[in-house]
Image: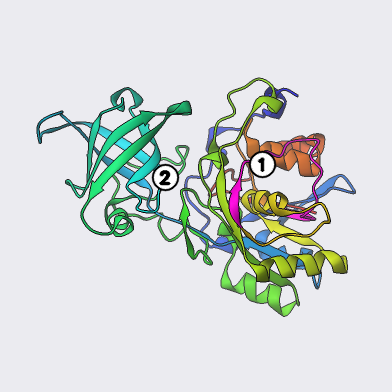
Amino acid sequence: MLVSEFDYFLPADLIAQAPATERDRSRMLVLDRAGKKWQDSSFAEFPTFINERDLIVINNTQVFPARLIGHRRRKGTESEFRFVEILLIQPLNDKKDEWEVLGKPARGLREGAELVFGNGRLRGVVTAVLEEGRRQLRFEFDGDFDQIVDEIGNTPLPPYIKRKLRERDRLDEPRYQTIYAKERGAIAAPTAGLHFTSRILDELRSRRIGIAEITHHVGYATFQPVRVERVEDHHLASEHYQISEDAARSINFTKKAGNRVVAIGTTTVRALESTMESNSVIRPGRGKTELFIYPGYQFRAIDALLTNFHLPQSSLLMMVAAFAGRELVREAYRHAVNSNYRFYSYGDCMLIL
């Protein structure tokens, strides 16, 4: 299967640069897999498409300000030169003084390069050059690492959302975060969840629709480029997840009763499908997953999916095609483009039933 089969044309002006004025007023394209058809709707109508006793599974990961802007330091001196920017991907130990990062300009991040952030509050040195442009950094700092990052870091927006390089007003902080975020650790938002409001959650509960929370920290795998020609040759980086006993119990009860498990976002799908055992039971616990879902995959944990519109040739689009069928997804995306839906993180959404 070729990666090029998951390409599509998207005019640049359909890439959403800002969120909708109100979270739950985004547009929603509803796909019917069985009938191979779709209808235009609004996320405000989302609860009407969910049945009583179905279960909504949300990802409560919290985005932290993982984008750090600083300078490279001239070796052996205190003088700083050359701007650098890094994205914290994942800590490599509990002390959080060793991290895997993405950085630019890459040519300035050779092994041994010394970096300074926040006027010296964080000092780092590149200890290893990894694959796909990643680096390993060792940090020195005084105090609590998370607190320092919260004070000097920036919201880690995707590169297709354009902001001034040294923006410090943090306009995106409240909106590039779900309203139910609570477990720190994501370097990108689980964007399907951005549409939810307290009103929507209350309406779901009033309709006797269950809501379960899991944690899947959105990491490098979610936006990792697919650089191979054949889909089967792509390998995802690992991401961390945790499923509580309460969440597993709710999911297993719903499945056993014959009701639907509705996953909110692709990260929720990966966590649930990674923990589904051969006896069709979700097991609680924490772990890492490298599960790559593409057409041909047999879903066992989920019955419906809410997701945003994804980049061409991305692993996320391949997952959606695996769930709804390549042809139906291709036609639905063509309709979304022709109907001026807003795409990507701050864009509109798609409910696949």
Identity, as a three-letter code, of the amino acid under mark 2: Leu
Identity, as a three-letter code, of the amino acid under mark 1: Leu
Image mark for residue 92: 2
On the image, the x and y values in percent for residue 68 come to 31, 44
In-front residue for pair 140/337: 140
| Of callouts 2 and 1, the N-terminal one | 2
| Residue at x-position 79% and y-position 47% | 299
Image mark for residue 291: 1
Residue interval drawn in magenta: 286-305
Tell me if I can see residue 337 in this picture.
Answer: no
Instruction: Please tell me in which quadrant of the rendered image residue 242 appears.
Output: bottom right
Q: Is residue 28 left or right of residue 125?
A: right
| Residue at x-position 32% and y-position 22% | 107
Q: Residues within 10 Å of mark 1 (few under 14, many from 20)?
A: some
| Residue at x-position 82% and y-position 64% | 255
The vertical placement of 94 against 79, above or below, is below
Q: Is residue 321 left or right of residue 10?
A: right
Instruction: Please tell me in which quadrant of the rendered image residue 161 appears.
Output: top left
State the residue lying farthest toward the right: 35
